[in-house]
Image (cartoon, rainbow, N blue to C red):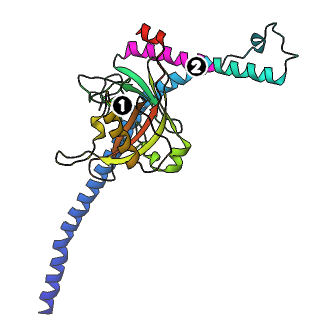
Amino acid sequence: MAERGKRAAASGRRSFGPVRVLLILIFAAVFVFSGYMFLSTYLEGQKEQGAFDQLTQLKTEILTGAGSEEIDMSLYFPDGDYSTASAEEIAAAEERAAAEALAREQQAKLDWYSQMKEEYPDLIGWVSVPGMLIDYPVMYTPEDPDYYLHRSYDGSYARSGTPFLGEGGDENSDCTIVYGHNMKNDTMFGTLEEYKEESFGRANPVVYFDSLEEIRAYTVFAAVECRVLTETENDLRYYQYAGPLDERSFDELNDWLIDRSIYDLGAAPQFGDQIVILSTCSYHTEDGRFIVAAFRERPEETEETIQAE
């Protein structure tokens, strides 16, 4: 009787053995496959980012060259002699020289944008955020707004896509929305959520969204966690406000952004200012979004500007 019990127990152990081995093999296969997928996605992302890094490096080299000219102080004095100039006169000349160097750098950037436009017709501008890795071309295809969702700036497939303008507005709209993926390798808008920290927002209050004709700096005034709403939900949908805004629509959007902002930066646009919103996915909730809103005062229209238009 005892012998049969021992044989049964041994038989049970033998029958469990293959099952355990099979489970181990399954878990190992899942682990290896997961590792492969992670590595594959990482390498794919790095390869895609490499193309953008080359583009950014080219831009940096052009701007460095434009702003690296040695300053000849004699050009800022009538007789070319500044040996007897006062400290105030020299400081004024240095300030003028710095302003001219900045103007040359900005013009070099605009010239480069123009060259890029010839090669990549869908280019509409350039977005960059000091203190972040965000430094990318922005594409615009109004007939197919999501065209660059998974395409590089040259039109080739890219899982991380390229920042693009969504439906409804262009670079000169009252409200412009720039969309970018929240990539785990920190590319595209993968670092945008750093603006969730008030200290970061206060230390980095300016974002740039250049058009092809103008360098544009925007003052950040809101950082908002939100989500894409269902058809039955009643709340403001910021993604429907891209484009021209009358005063009522402007105030609705402005009030919503400020009320929903994670913190108060003490800045707010006025009707007539241009708003740009950087938008990316967020994982704090289902269909979550994180957006950073900034504004700039439009240059006042002069009689010459109106006539030129």
Left or right position of 140 against 100: left
Q: Position of residue 252 (x, y in %)?
A: 33, 40
- Per the image, label 2 sits on a secondary structure element best described as helix
Above or below residue 33? Residue 168 is above
Q: Residue at x 14, y 88 (%)?
A: 5
Q: Is residue 65 visible?
A: no
Image side of residue 262 versus residue 141, left or right? right
- Left or right, residue 106 beside residue 21: right
Mark with earlier residue (2, 1): 2
User: Magenta includes 161?
Assistant: no
Q: Residue furthest bottom?
A: 1
Tell which of 248 and 125 is nearer to you: 248
Residue 115 lies in magenta, yes or no? Answer: yes
Residue underneath mark 2: 105
| Label 1: element kind | strand
The magenta segment is: 101-120
| Residue of label 1 | 175
| Residues packed near mark 2 inside 10 Å, few (<14), some (14 to 19) or many (20 plus) | some
Callout 1, which amino acid? Cys
Residue type, label 2: Glu
Say which quadrant the N terminus sits in.
bottom left
For the C terminus, the quadrant is: top left
Is most of the magenta stretch helix, strand or loop? Answer: helix
Q: Position of residue 255 (x, y in %)?
A: 37, 43
Across and down, in percent, residue 302 comes to 48, 14
Q: CA distance from mark 2 to mark 1?
A: 28 Å
Tag 2–tag 1 contact (CB < 8 Å): no
